Image (spheres, grey):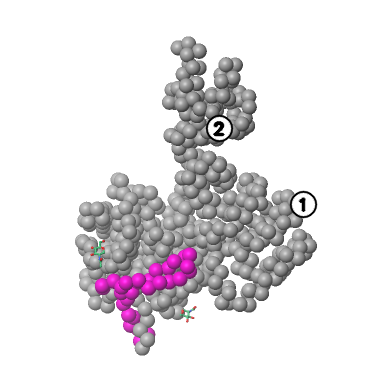
Amino acid sequence: MSQSLWKVRTLMLIKSYFVDAVHIYVPCLQMGCWKLKKSGWISKDLDPCSMGQLIEFMYTSMIEITVDNVQGILQGASMLGLHQLRKMSATFLQSQLTALNCLGIYFLADLYMCGELEMAARQFIFQNFLDVIHSEEFLQLSEDRLITLLRSDKLQVTSENQVLEAALSWINAEPEIRTRNACLILQYVKLALIDMTHLENIVLKLDFVKNCLKCQQLIGNAIALHYDQSALDLMTPRAQPPCVYVVGGRNSTDCQLKSMERYDFLIDQWHSVPNMNIARTAVGVCSLDGLLYAVGGECALADSQENTLYLRSVECYDPVLRQWIAKPEMKIARSFVALAAVGRFLYAIGGEDRACSYNIVEKYDTKNETWSFAPSMKRKRSGAGYCVCDGKIYVAGGFDRALHMDRASVECYDSLSEEWTFVSEMEKARSGLALVAIEHFIYAFGGRYKDRDQYFDLSERFNTLTNQWTTIKSLNTPRAWPGAAVFDGRIYILGGFDGTNRLRSAEVYDTEVDRWVFLSNMIVSRAGCGAAVV
Ligand SMILES: *[C@@H]1O[C@H](CO)[C@@H](O)[C@H](O)[C@H]1NC(C)=O
Ligand SMILES: *[C@@H]1O[C@H](CO)[C@@H](O)[C@H](O)[C@H]1NC(C)=O
């Protein structure tokens, strides 16, 4: 095709997209280059190379979007009203989000009105705020944009101190200019949620604070609020990043626990969080839709040291409200119950009471908040390991009170076909083991073999694709009835009973290097606890 015909057709395409554009591009096309002579409504920054690619795209419907050209393509596609291409660029950018570029991408999405990308980038910023604040982009934010960020309760931080630190590092990036308006910024830090000694000893002593009456007032007010509990209670903290929570269990003096603690990954420390309404051990715990559920278990009977009360009660922790809320009870009271979430349903599986072990399954619909029965397991199991892998529930091992027997068998429930099927058995029969899933692997840790009162540090891994168990690196410590959770590709095994003591210790397994490392000890010793990430 001749060069001139190509130009004409391109020109007509442009014309059909954006009549105004013609006036600008005509002279360029005639000169045989894509340089823009005058900017008008077109941003001066649109690079000629992207323009060339865009015009070629209009002609061939083919374009290669790369990290280097995506910004220009998005800009050009937006100007020329190439909606499909704009969407493709946005999708590409969304796949490239990192803590270092998400602010830039967010503002780009805002500028070109790419709604979906804007939402995704904003969500990314909130979730990764603690990394974002170390980026160059963060330090270069305009004052307005910083304030927009600081106003949001959706920033995920473990404490308001981190928001203060972020604001201070932004101010310190250009101290001559930014300290002048620091009080404007500090307004949006929830200073009352920052511990008082830090405010008094550090923040009040910053130079720019000493020179600004308004800053001093803000901090003074925050300190005063520390003496007014009812006002403090009204202050909503920021969103919490996902954390591992450990719930209930028994402590070293054999008492059932109401308490819950949360692991802070950043500083390797445990924090107390609000107690459950009822003390529970041998409790079923899992998370669903940002809430943490505690189901069944045993609590102490007021008049008896020996006997316990088997629970049908259910409660649910909301990490945003920081509150436990009672939910409808199960039909059958049980402890050592397995609890798994699939779709919008919770499944309370097996367990025991004083008389027997169960194979029954109750299913809780979070939509209408009702329990109903689902197909029973093939075997009775209490203290079985449980997890969800590829949308299927796996229940491994467990004890049968009637037969006085620990099981090695493993069953899998498919909620679509509503059927239980056996998969390969574990190497050792046991109950009180922890089961977790990562990708298509299931990991089984620890447990007890009651017949010989034997406690295991054994770790096994099951490949759901090949239906095979293999042994992996043992736990540092034998543990039965620990809490277990997966976060960020690592496996956390928390507390448990080693045959002599209930444990405070906790360890984390790195699947890539097949290695266990101890975490900081929990605040209290716990066995029979549950754990989940919310
Ligand atoms: C165990 O928990 C009970 C009830 O919370 C408490 O009274 C007791 O002091 C705890 N024991 C230890 C050793 O912390
Ligand atoms: C709740 O929904 C389930 C379906 O998940 C249904 O079987 C049950 O009858 C409903 N219960 C009530 C009380 O609406």
Say which element carries label 1: helix
From the viewer's side, name the closer residue of 211 and 429.
Answer: 211
From the viewer's side, name the closer residue of 215 and 400.
Answer: 215
In this rendering, would 224 be left or right of 396?
right
**Callout 1 amino acid:** Glu
| Magenta residues (range) | 304-332
Within 10 angstroms of label 1, few (less than 14), some, or many (20 or more) residues?
A: few
- Image quadrant of residue 236? bottom right
From the viewer's side, name the closer residue of 227 and 380.
Answer: 227
Total marks in image: 2
Q: Position of residue 301 (x, y in %)?
A: 35, 84
Residue at the (47%, 62%) spot, across then down: 244
Quarter of the figure with the N terminus: top left
Q: Is residue 174 visible?
A: yes
Q: Which residue is mark 1?
A: 176
- Image quadrant of residue 413? bottom left
Quarter of the figure with the C terminus: bottom left
Q: Position of residue 262 (x, y in %)?
A: 49, 66
The dot on residue 146 is: none
Q: Which residue is mark 2?
A: 72
